[in-house]
Each structure stands twice: as structure tokens, then as C-alpha cells.
Image: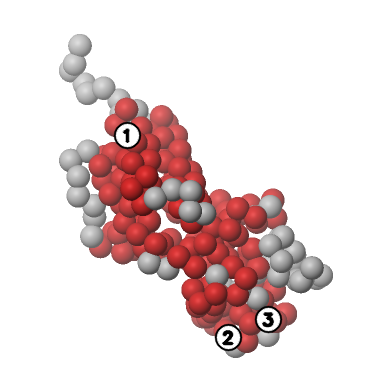
Amino acid sequence: MPADAHRTKAAPDAGRAEPASPLTERQEARRRRILEACARLASRGGFDAVQMREVAESSQVALGTLYRYFPSKIHLLVATMQDQLEHLHATLRKKPPAGETAAERAAGTLMRAFRAMQRDPLLADAMVRALTFADRSVSAEVEQVFRRTTAIVLDATDLTDPTPEQLSAVRVIGHTWHSTLITWLSGRASIEQVGVDIETVCRLIDLTAPPRSGRR
């Protein structure tokens, strides 16, 4: 089995991603080149096109350096998804969603996010497959992906002080969004079905809203 097979297989001397302390400007620039190279390769050929040696060559870093930043292909692709969601979040902040209710705003935002993924299906498929294949060694990176998704939904709903029930609903909405990506990418759901599912689950936001004061 090749080193870049879908298992979370790391280089022999690789441990966790480098380093826990904040990156220097030079290290951040190197990490940025790696993520951009990964996204380019995935956009052209999907999951199988992302090979660590090719990523290293494309980003002009040594293969050993690449493994210090990302111990495996799965770590790299999940980090790429986190990076893509960060860019998407910034774009959504510039143009907040319309809608009278929190549920409508959340659904509108997630469908915009979905359409962004739809425009680059090979990259989307590669990132989602990595997220699916990820084991416990990638738990920190996976958690960052879901945290970013939660932040996107919270910004869309404009909930400044969400209740525990609303936070739980937001997490369920995020999980559903990722699930609809998988079903669409696998050809088991149409765009229309995705839209219906997203709108349905986003109603949880309004259903978990506390009752207005003064009502009896």
C-alpha cells in the first residue's frame, strides 16, 4: 500500500503537527504554501492526486519539513478544509445573510457555503473523504473544522448569547451540513434535497429559542 493511502499513515518519525507554539512569519508563509499546493492538487485530481511528495515539490519545501507540519495526507487535507472554511467565513462576514429568522439566516449561509464547495467538487470530495477517514490522531484538526462550522452558523444567526439548547442545535446543524456534503458528493442526494434537509434542520434554532419575556 502506498504511503499516501487513505489511512492516516504518518512518516516513521512523525509525531504531531509542528509546532504547538505560534508560528513565525516564515513558518506561517511556508505553511500557507503547503495548504495552497494541497488545494491546487486536489482541485485538479481529487483525493488521489494529493501525494505528499508532490505537495512538497509544489510548495517548495523539503519532504521531511512537510511531514513535520502535517504528519500525514489526512492531517493535511483536514487542515486544508479548515483553511477553506476560514476563507469562506471571512467572505460570509462581508455579506451577512438575509432572512427574518435565525433559521432562515442559518440555512441561507450554509447553502452559500455548500455552493462554494459545489464550484470545486474535486477539492470538496478530497477534503470530505479525509474528514471521513480521519482517526484519533487527527482529532484536533477535525475539531477545528467543526468549531469553524459552528462559528459560521452562530455568526449567521446573530445569536449573541445562545442558550445551551441553541448551541446544541447549532452543533447538530453543523453535523448535518457535513453529512449532506457526503451524500451529495456520493451522488445519493440532489441539490434540491440538500436544500430541504438544511432548511429543515436549521429550524431547530427557532424551536430552541427561549420564550419571550412577558408572555404567559
| Residue that sits furthest to the right in the current view | 12
Q: Amino acid at mark 2?
A: Ser
Tell me residue 3's x, y (percent): 75, 71
Q: Amino acid at mark 3?
A: Arg
Q: Is residue 178 left or right of residue 211?
A: right
Foreground pick, 50 / 159: 50
Determine which of the numbered discs, if any, sits on residue 53 in the image.
3
Foreground pick, 148 / 6: 6
Tell me residue 118's x, y (percent): 39, 62
Q: Is residue 94 left or right of residue 185?
A: left
The quarter holding residue 171 reads top left
Please state, as top left, top right, bottom left or bottom right, where the N terminus lies in the image.
bottom right
Using the rendered image of the protein, determine whether residue 156 is visible from the camera's viewpoint: no
Disc with the residue nearer the chain's start (1 vs 3): 3
Which residue position is annotated with label 1?
Answer: 203
Residue at (41%, 35%) from the top-left corner? 169
Whether pointer 3 and pointer 2 mark residues with C-beta atoms closer than 8 Å, the reply is no
Q: CA distance from mark 3 to mark 2?
A: 9 Å
Q: Provide the secondary structure element on which disc 3 rests.
A: helix
Q: Provide the secondary structure element on which disc 2 rests.
A: helix
Which residue position is annotated with label 2?
Answer: 58
Disc with the residue nearer the chain's start (1 vs 2): 2
Disc with the residue nearer the chain's start (3 vs 2): 3
Q: Provide the secondary structure element on which disc 1 rests.
A: helix
Foreground pick, 18 / 33: 33
Q: CA distance from mark 1 to mark 2?
A: 44 Å
